[in-house]
Structure formats: C-alpha cells, structure tokens
Image (cartoon, helix red, strand yellow):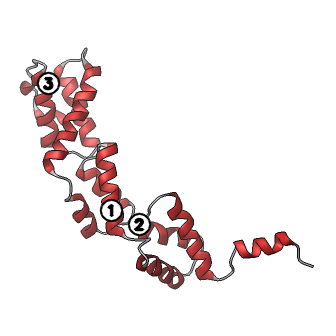
Amino acid sequence: MSTGADTDRTEAEPTDPESSARNVCLRLLTARPRSRAELAGALARKGVADEVAARVLDRLGEVGLVDDAAYADLVVRSGHRHRSMGRRALSAELRRRGVDDDTVGEAVATIDPSEEEQTARQLVERKLRAMSGLDDATRVRRLAGMLARRGYPQGMAYRVVREALRELGSDAELVDPEHLT
C-alpha cells in the first residue's frame, strides 16, 4: 500500500536520467548563472552519462538558460563594476569557470581602457587614505601590488599610483618601478 508521502517523493525525484539531469541544472541555475562547463562538471559529479548531459545542456542552451557569451558578459560587468577587477583577473576568472578563450576575449574587450584606468584610480584613492604614515616606496609597492592582484597591468598600476601620490605632493616618480615585482 502506497502512502501520499511515497507518491510525492516519486514525483519530486524523477527516475528518467534526462529529467534528473535537467533538475540538477535548473537547481544550480536558480542560485546563480553558470557556464556550460560548470554545469557539465556538476552533472559528471552526479554520475550523469556524457551523452545525457550533452542533450540536456544543448536543450538548455536552445531555450536560452545556458549561454556562455551572455554569462561571460555578466561576469565581466559585475566583476569590473562591483569587485573592481581588471581585465587580466576577469579573464582568469572566466577561464577557471570553463569559458572558452574566444568568448573570454570578446567579453573582456567590452571594458573600455579609460574606464579600467578610472576604476584603478578610485581603488588607489580609497586605499591611499589609510596609508598616510607610510613612506612613498612602501605605499607604491602596496598600492601597485593591490592593483596587480586585481588584474591591472603593471604599467598602468605604477602610473596611477605615481599620479595619485604626486597629487598629494609626493616625489613618487623617484621610486624605481622595478621594485613593484
């Protein structure tokens, strides 16, 4: 004899491999957008056969739920605006999430170089306030290091830091850029 609870469990947990795989993907996509590679990895960890995973991911792509180009654009916009990440760090983040190099390149190319530099300036200005008691060499090293960790190019980092220090009346141009690494 079957109870109501048994019937609910059967309906909630489909035995069809494609339905199970689709439910795994939809649950993951409910939390946040994901790349096709992230979803494929999750399905592999759940033991879903490759051909079933491919069919499910293809179908989710057809209906617009899995789109690596849109996903990459979202990660780039969000990472740059909210986490102040530079192009290099954003590229690494997308590659880590399984997005192919061409898609990564297209997404990262949407960041305007002047906007990237402005974001670097804002980061430096914010951090510089707390470094008033430090000598110029230490400030340059720490600020340029912070920008490098966030994916900004070394030349831009050094120039932005030097200009910010110069605005404070410092002789930062005397600091050797070789000390940044």
For the residues bearing labels 3 and 2, Cβ distance under 8 angstroms: no
Give the position of the C terminus as an image quadrant. top left
The Cα atoms of the two marked residues, 2 and 1, are separated by 8 Å
To which residue does mark 3 refer? 165
Q: Find numbered disc 2 in the image and state the secondary structure of the residue it sits on.
A: loop
The disc at residue 35 is 2
Of tags 1 and 3, which is closer to the observer? 1
For the residues bearing labels 1 and 3, Cβ distance under 8 angstroms: no
Q: Find numbered disc 1 in the image and state the secondary structure of the residue it sits on.
A: helix
Dot 2 amino acid type: Ser
Q: Is residue 99 visible to the viewer in this orientation of the structure? A: yes
Disc nearer the start of the sequence (2/1):
2
Disc nearer the start of the sequence (1/3):
1
In the picture provided, is 129 more to the left or to the right than 160?
right
The residue that appears at 56% across and 75% down in the rendered structure is 22
To which residue does mark 1 refer? 72
Mark 1: few, some, or many residues within 10 Å (few <14, many ≥20)?
A: many
Residue that extends furthest to the right in the rendered view of this protein = 1
Residue 87 position in % (x across, y down): 23, 52
The residue that appears at 44% across and 71% down in the rendered structure is 65
Residue that extends furthest to the top in the rendered view of this protein = 133
Dot 3 amino acid type: Leu
- Image vertical order of residue 110 relative to residue 145, above or below: below
For the residues bearing labels 2 and 1, Cβ distance under 8 angstroms: yes
For residue 136, which quarter of the picture? top left
